[in-house]
């Protein structure tokens, strides 16, 4: 399939509720069709992987084309510069999270980019850096100064943009959940900052407010 053929298929899959949902979370009328995630996955399935097609789809700037690109790209075939450029070109939080999950976290050289991204002024580069850091804190914390990381979160998170704040908060919660020696400090920081304290959550879902999140996950470990 060509890019034009795929864009035609995506346009035909437009869903008005999804279109409105995307607008609510920062998309525009110009950069999306409003396609359900399940339909994008179904479109990706027969393509499997196609590096050049993925790059060309990404270049369109269309949200759904970029979602599809994340599913058919081979992360290891990207250069660090190409990955960095892609991360910085994102302007839609749900796409950033897909890209971080399917591409950034699978990239062999991600650790070489992580700390630089954490210091980036670009909101989505910073979001990617903190997302990787949350993963390191959870699964491979060796070499990370957790006390210094908590100092930084306490100092920087109140003034961070919402895109970055989300994954900084995830890092804070994961420190509290996975590292008992730092749990009380993480809880104190969460209470002090109060970020996401009043965040609306659906029934049965855990609040992203760090103290609630930490205590809920710890209680499940017992």
Image (tube, rainbow, N blue to C red):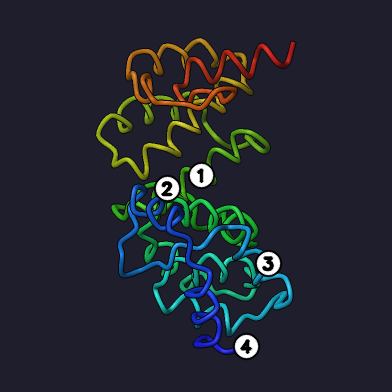
State the residue position of label 3: 42
Q: Nearer the viewer, mark 3 or mark 2?
A: 3
Q: State if disc 1 and disc 2 touch (CB < 8 Å).
A: yes
Q: CA distance from mark 1 to mark 3?
A: 27 Å
Q: Is residue 28 above or below residue 142?
A: below
Residue at horizontal 65 percent and vertical 62 percent from the top: 108
The quadrant of the image that shows the C terminus is top right
State the residue position of label 4: 1
Q: Could you say whether the residue bearing mark 3 is in a helix, strand or loop?
A: helix
Q: CA distance from mark 4 to mark 3?
A: 14 Å
Check residue 131 in the rendering and tell me which mark sits there, or answer none. Answer: 1
Q: CA distance from mark 2 to mark 1?
A: 6 Å
Q: CA distance from mark 3 to mark 2?
A: 28 Å
- Of labels 3 and 2, earlier in sequence is 3
Q: Residues within 10 Å of mark 4 (few under 14, many from 20)?
A: few
Q: CA distance from mark 4 to mark 1?
A: 33 Å
Q: Nearer the viewer, mark 4 or mark 1?
A: 4
- Of labels 1 and 3, earlier in sequence is 3
Is residue 193 rendered to the left or right of residue 69?
left
């Amino acid at each position: 399939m060509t890019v034009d053929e795929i864009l035609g298929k995506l346009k035909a899959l437009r869903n008005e509720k999804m279109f409105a949902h995307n607008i609510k979370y920062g998309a525009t009328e110009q950069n999306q069709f409003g396609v359900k995630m399940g339909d994008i996955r179904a479109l990706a399935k027969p393509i499997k992987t196609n590096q050049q097609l993925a790059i060309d789809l990404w270049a369109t700037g269309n949200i759904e084309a970029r979602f599809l690109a994340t599913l058919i790209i081979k992360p290891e075939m990207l250069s660090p510069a190409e990955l960095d450029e892609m991360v910085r070109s994102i302007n839609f939080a749900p796409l950033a999270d897909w890209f971080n999950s399917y591409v950034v976290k699978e990239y062999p050289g991600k650790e070489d980019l992580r700390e630089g991204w954490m210091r980036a002024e670009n909101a989505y580069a910073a979001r990617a850096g903190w997302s990787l850091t949350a993963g390191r804190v959870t699964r491979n914390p060796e070499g990370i100064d957790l006390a210094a990381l908590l100092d930084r979160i306490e100092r920087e998170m109140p003034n961070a943009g919402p895109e970055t704040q989300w994954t900084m908060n995830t890092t804070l919660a994961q420190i509290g959940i996975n590292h008992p020696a730092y749990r009380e400090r993480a809880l104190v920081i969460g209470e002090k900052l109060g970020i996401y304290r009043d965040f609306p959550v659906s029934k049965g879902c855990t609040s992203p407010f760090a103290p609630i999140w930490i205590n809920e996950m710890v209680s499940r470990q017992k």
